[in-house]
Amino acid sequence: MLTAGPRLGIDFGTSHTVAVLMSADRVLRPLLFDGSPLLPSAVYAEPDGRLLIGRDAWHSMRTAPARFEPYPKQRIDEGAVLLGEAEVPVVELIAAVLRRVAGEAARVSGDPPVEAVLTCPSGWGTARREVLHEAAAGVFARSRLVAEPVAAACCFVAAAGGRIPVGGCAAVYDFGAGTFDASVVRRTADGFEVLAERGLSETGGLDIDAAIVARLGETYAALDPVRWDRLISPVRPDDQRLRRTLWDDVRTAKEILARTTATMVHLPLFDVDVPITRELLDDVARPIVQRTVDATRAAIDAAGVRVTDLAGVFLVGGSSRLQLAGSMLHRAFGMPVTITDQPELVVAEGSLHAAVDTDTDTGGPATDAGHPDAGTPAAGPAQPGAGWPSAGPEVTGPLPPAPRRPVRTARVAAAVVLALLLAAVGVWVGTDRDGKGDSPDGGLSQARTLSAPAADPSPSPSPSLPSPSLTPAQCLVGTWRQTANRSTWTVGGRTVELQSSGTINRFRADGIAVVEYLGAGVTRTGTSGGNRYEITSVGTITVAYAASDHTIYLRDATSIGTLTTKVNGRVVESGTMVASLEPEDYTCSGDTLRFWNSRWTIDAVRVSTTT
């Protein structure tokens, strides 16, 4: 067995690298880099040869873009990369990222890790695994590789309390920034084996970013082709910086739209703020997501497993936060999908679960658990990914300087709608909210099962309501008047906090809720940066709802009305209300009601026990 000490699980990704530290008593914690668990995998070469990593690399890129490599993982087959005037081996680029991780781990734990467990796509061949292993060997005293789908399955088993029986199978849907991988794994008495894998090396979150930029180009390239060309194919360093800013803003907007229905993107050179809605995002992303769904079906077919026999479909990777991905998978396979609150951490955490009970040597040189020459023998899988072992004993417990792939333009006008952020719930319904996902050994991830409607999606897909046992809580039934509404909005790229009161909420006993902005409507007001903001809603919204003891769930929203935004008394936007579905917790006692989520807190008093 290994000497007691901290272990490190690392998911070296295209866009970001994440790492989870396991203490000697098997308590897990994510490493933070500049306050975030996501370390950009970017590398910047200083003139003196030093390599800067992460946000330091992105910051330095502004002065000399030619010295910058944002995605070393995409260059793994190239041997060396030209950064400025020097060729830097890809092994050294990867090792530099791993050294940053190792340094943070040692700082946090007080000791260097006794072992690093790194993950790779199960479809990687020997040459690619050797590059990653060589980079790790230059940083860690002992290291091993674990297949990403095996790590993901181990994490979900630990989080879900052994929901996959021995002999059971699961599909792993790994949607990252640069690539997509679908795998089918089977649980054995000794861990997991990969039955089949289908990868899309040219499909990832970056393609969705490119599709959004292409959609913007349909409008703004026609308005001023010279300025658009400067922004998309810059030559001068200042234009290159502006392009980076645009793509970074687009990526951020995409992430925001996983939580709400509209946001803004600033378009450099044109100096305008362009509204981006979830409807637009879903429209440009749908063909990309469809490829991932098709690849998942192909992996299931290749494994010889029926969809109805799967214990689950597990979503992994930052791009799996895209709500369209979950809804399309649910409609394609007719079963809920499962995602954790932090899908970026699943593989790193799972690598530790996969490796913790498989030690057979007492230190010695580093071994590669995923390499055919591994010092620790293990049975390999029967399908693509041969050479990967099972996971071990049963687990109980922003922009690139230029995208390296063609920009795929989409054919639709860039029409956008302002979104109304209501008292509503998230597009996905978490059926494991009551602690079912807690890991018995201090795991970080809590899995929840997600479901979506079988019908074609609306611009903001509606969820299936929770199980029939969740009926409208009696306390909610009646008519309520909001006495305080504190909410956060994005206007012109600026985040502002607004307040209002007076909205009427009606919760009917038959599971229908109505939000009313009657007469002249309800106006939210606030100031920020010396400007006064007013957002007025006029009309009604009707939805179906269900409630547990502490959570309200909503679906099938129908909006009739308008939303108008003013800055310093001047109308800057006006459009149709669109309901946002986001989970809300609530407390209800007699004649008082409070409900809240990440965007707002609302207090209300009972007007009547009838509606």
Image (spheres, rainbow, N blue to C red):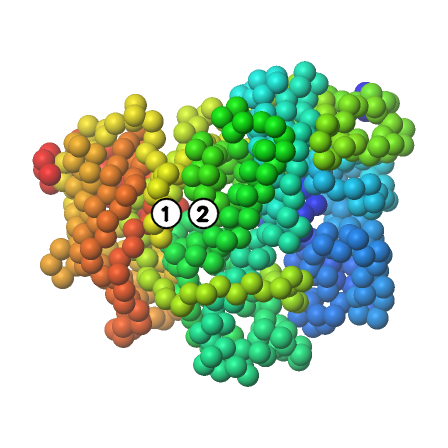
* Residues at circles 2 and 1 in contact by the CB criterion of under 8 Å: yes
Judge whether 408 appears above or below 554 on screen.
Answer: below
Q: Secondary structure at mark 1?
A: loop
Q: Secondary structure at mark 2?
A: helix
Q: Is residue 359 left or right of residue 18?
A: right
The residue that label 1 is drawn on is 457
Label of residue 413 in the image:
none
The residue that label 2 is drawn on is 324
Question: Can residue 489 be seen by looking at this rendering?
Answer: yes
Q: Is residue 138 left or right of residue 608?
A: right
Q: Is residue 266 left or right of residue 83?
A: left
Kindly give the residue lying farthest to the right in the view shown: 364
| Residue type pointed to by label 1 | Pro
Which label lies toward us, 2 or 1? 1
Q: Nearer the viewer, residue 608 or 410?
A: 410
Q: Residue at x 32, y 61 (%)?
A: 418
Q: Residue at x 39, y 46 (%)?
A: 598
| Residue type pointed to by label 2 | Leu
Q: Position of residue 70 (x, y in %)?
A: 69, 59
Along the polypeptide, which appears first: circle 2 or circle 1?
A: 2
